Amino acid sequence: MKNYLLVILLTLSAFVFGQKLQLVSGNTDFLKDQKEINVKLDFDDAKFYDDNKTETQYLENRKKDVLENPKRGEVYWKEWIAAWQENRDKTFLDTFIRGTKKTKELKFTQNSAAKYTLIIKTEWIYPGYHAGIVIEPAKLSTTLSFVETANPSNTLLIYKTDKVAGTAGKNDFKMEYGRIASAYEKTGQLLVKKI
């Protein structure tokens, strides 16, 4: 029993402490007097799974899986792809911002006239899975770049994240986009702890 407990504790500690931001360049000095940061999500060139499928390849495989399932079909696929687009274009960024709410000093928001913009470059996604009582959270790798809004070529701070896992047990975890959104939220939480 003691060995079993030890294995669980070691696994949990590796999971919790393994999710960190890696500073690539810059520092946070420019944020000292700021109240608001504009946020944008860059989903171009995102890769999926360990074999680095493009988003197009991922969606083609997902469509094939859906259409081959006799309980689903074309109507379900149309609903699924519409939900995917909504999540990709809006919800992923919204949940990242929700993850940053623990900071009272800085407000992260979209379409702001703030002096600085945070660009979340999605590098890699593992969508996880939901199989009844067994849930594998999504994992997300990103590059987080703080740039001047008026001059985006001036990058002030860059962090990288590697395979940040979303939180299991959320209500919207059944579909992959809910699991992926949770990984964006966790990334936002990690960022505000660092700055």
Image (cartoon, rainbow, N blue to C red):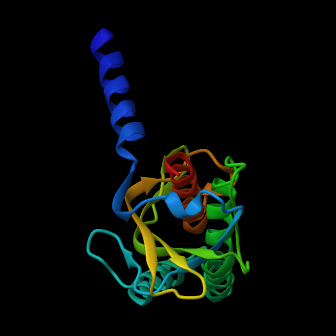
The number of numbered badges drawn on the structure is: 0
Is residue 49 left or right of 39 when viewed as pictured? left
User: In which quadrant of the rendered view does residue 150 lie?
Assistant: bottom right
Q: Which residue is drawn at 60% across and 82% down?
A: 149
Q: Is residue 144 above or below residue 166?
A: below
Is residue 179 left or right of 9 when viewed as pictured? right
Q: Nearer the viewer, residue 171 or 98?
A: 98
Q: In this view, does 15 lie above or below 137?
A: above
Q: In which quarter of the image is the N terminus?
A: top left
Q: Where is residue 13 in the image (x, y as percent from the top left)?
A: 37, 31
User: In which quadrant of the rendered view does residue 47 lie?
Assistant: bottom left
Q: Position of residue 66 (x, y in %)?
A: 53, 79
Q: Please say whether residue 143 is visible from this viewpoint.
A: no
User: In which quadrant of the rendered view does residue 161 lie?
Assistant: bottom left
Q: Is residue 61 above or below residue 192?
A: below
Q: Where is residue 131 in the image (x, y as percent from the top left)?
A: 51, 53
Is residue 73 left or right of 142 when viewed as pictured? right
Q: Please say whether residue 5 is visible from this viewpoint.
A: yes
Q: Which of 14 and 37 is in front in this view?
A: 37
Q: Position of residue 174 (x, y in %)?
A: 61, 58
Q: Which residue is drawn at 50% across and 84% down?
A: 63
Q: Which of 41 and 178 is in front in this view?
A: 41
**Outermost residue toward the top?**
2
